[in-house]
Amino acid sequence: MVRTLTARPTVKLGHLIGKSYESRFTGDVTKSTYRTCSLPERPDEGSRVQAVACEYCEELVGFRIYSIAGTVRLRRRWLVLGCVGLVVSGLAGADLFRSHPLLAQTAGLVVLSAALVALGLAAVIAGFIGCRQDDGVRLLSGRPRHNML
Ligand SMILES: [Zn+2]
């Protein structure tokens, strides 16, 4: 699902108000409960650093909020990252299975090739998610109990 870009970011500032723990058949589950508040509207162009007051505790939390065009550029970067990851993992993976590999000639380089495949696949996954879901908002100050939701 592609996150639609609107004048006001759809991600919210969340204040953690509680955690609960449940034991299930598949394992323990932690449920976090947040109180949320909306972020201000995007700038017309570029990006803006802004402190947002939490509606629950009134603590200021810093964000960088990108314009719609800026967010589209961020999504393109995610797409480029995913494409680079696809190429790297494809080349490294193909090299592992060649009869005369370029990289994987020793055991150490086999590990390196396998690591490149894994990193490339991680970049593909991150790029695929980022190019569809990035809302152009970055949390600048890591405040305890606060998160982007
Ligand atoms: Zn708060």
Image (cartoon, rainbow, N blue to C red):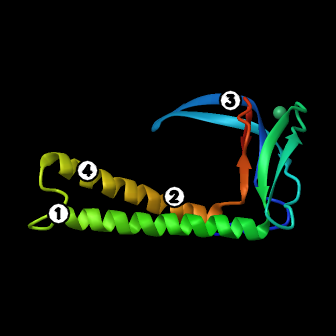
Which sits earlier in the primary sequence, circle 4 or circle 1? 1
* Residue at mark 1 to residue at mark 3: CA–CA distance: 51 Å
Residue shown at the point (16%, 65%) measured from the top left: 97
Where does label 2 land, which residue? 126
Residue shown at the point (39%, 67%) measured from the top left: 86
Q: Element type at marker 4? A: helix
Circle 1: residue type? Leu
Which sits earlier in the primary sequence, circle 2 or circle 1? 1
Quadrant of the rendered image holding ligand 1: top right
Residue shown at the point (26%, 50%) measured from the top left: 112
The disc label shown at residue 19, or none: 3
Where does label 4 land, which residue? 112
Circle 3: residue type? Lys
Is 111 rendered above or below residue 124?
above
* Residue at mark 2 to residue at mark 3: CA–CA distance: 28 Å
* Residue at mark 2 to residue at mark 1: CA–CA distance: 28 Å
Where does label 1 land, which residue? 102
| Quarter of the image where one finds residue 131 | bottom right
